Amino acid sequence: MPIEILMPALSPTMEEGTLAKWLVKEGDTVSSGDLLAEIETDKATMEFEAVDEGIIGKILIAEGSEGVKVNTAIAVLIEDGESVDDIAAPTAAAAVAPTQATPAAQVAPATAAPAPTPQTKDGSRLFATPLARRIAADQGVDLAQISGSGPHGRIIKADVMRSSATAPAPQAVATPVALATGPSADTVARMYEDREYEEIPLNGMRKIIAARLTEAKQSIPHFYLRRDIKLDPLLKFRAELNAQLASRSIKLSVNDFIIKACALALQAVPDANSVWAGDRMLKLKPSDVAVAVAIEGGLFTPVLKDADTKSLSTLSVEMKDLAARARDKKLAPHEYQGGSFAISNLGMMGIDSFDAVINPPHGAILAVGAGTKRPVVGKDGELAVATVMTVTLSVDHRVIDGALGAELLQSIVDNLENPMAMLA
């Protein structure tokens, strides 16, 4: 019988997306794992794979369609011998999007809609696609504990991914925060009705940034620790390393050293390698460091996992790759979610110092300013000139207290002022 292909949830927080491009057409035969379409989320453009075998009988959603809700039928798959005439109309609940007359509070997110009848544990067959079974086996997910959202209760890839992503820390998927704080849009528009302006609609990324940072500033008790770091030893050491690495076409940046310094500091001060998880803290063992990357219309924070165990050259190559794919919006969700600590570097833009907003659930973020020539007083009281960089550590006081934050920042400073020790 015909099987509906549903708009997938490509990340735990995705509620809608843009069907950017179909990679198949009606009449094409597809197998499990074949690419069907490119879908734009608020953060990235991702490829969507088939989970069943069959023939594309009908495409229900045209490419370029925006605001397609998760679990909306986007196409129908038929088997050999079936015809398009066998296709029933899409379920009203799946096809109807919220209207302006429907209050947003009354519309449940697609990912939270009631699932079909759960599968039984009495030995009866579990209906799941081959891809869903493979992912469940890889991630240790018990299919018997999952309610399928596919046709006739079949468990699909999105069900397994959702269960895997949310089971360890369901509290991390926060209720969307209202963007409006202050005057309404109409009130603001009236204030400028006699002035010429261009109205710029908010895209998905800008909405998410606004919501998350509003939530962060309102709910996270920030405090700030500031230090100056003498960079001359690091700059000299970096120049020597780059000369030796030139034959391998590797050029280390100051930011690569900062990533490594922060990763090692999280190992030296393990209590600071923690995140806030609602009713508890999670203390991480690896140093997973996120780095802010500015892109057109917003930013990404790709995560360098196990950064403490990687060489400077490996971190450099990995960071360049992540940054390039971030600018093309080609990062997968697992590449920009997670981490316990973040770095935001505006030094290359000439900013001397600034205070960064913590990206929840991280425990801290390091704001990095420019390295500039400044007068300094030496140990013996003599006046000299040195290259000095100011950094500011924004700390979540629920996770890290003042003394612990100071210890973490001291470790970062020690690593950067004695860069050769980071290779020991």
Image (cartoon, rainbow, N blue to C red):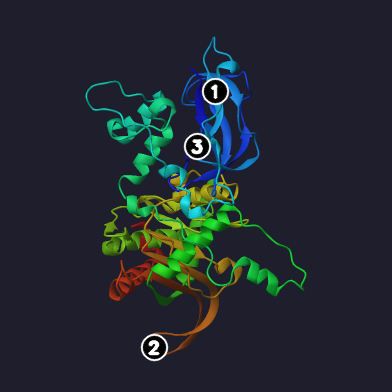
Q: Nearer the viewer, residue 235 or 360?
A: 360
Q: Which mark is residue 380?
A: 2
Residue 313 visible in the snapshot: no
Element class at badge 3: helix
Instruction: Name the mark nearer the viewer: 2 or 1.
Output: 1
| Crowd band around label 3 with a 10 angstrom C-alpha radius: few (<14), some (14–19), many (20+) | few
Quadrant that contains the C terminus: bottom left
Element class at badge 2: loop
At label 3, which amino acid type do we have?
A: Ala
**Number of on-image labels:** 3
List the residue tagged with mark 1: 88
x, y percentage for residue 153?
A: 38, 28
Quick one: label 3 or label 1, which is nearer the N terminus? 1
Outermost residue to the bottom: 381
Please give the name of the residue rendered at 77% of the width and 69% of the height, measured from the top-left corner: 196
Height in image: 379 above or below 100?
A: below
Contact (Cβ within 8 Å) of mark 3 with mark 2? no
List the residue tagged with mark 3: 93
Q: Nearer the viewer, residue 223 or 342?
A: 223
Please give the name of the residue rendered at 29% of the width and 71% of the height, measured from the top-left corner: 404
**What is the C-alpha distance between the residues marked 3 and 1?**
14 Å
Quick one: label 3 or label 2, which is nearer the N terminus? 3
Q: Nearer the viewer, residue 408 or 115?
A: 115
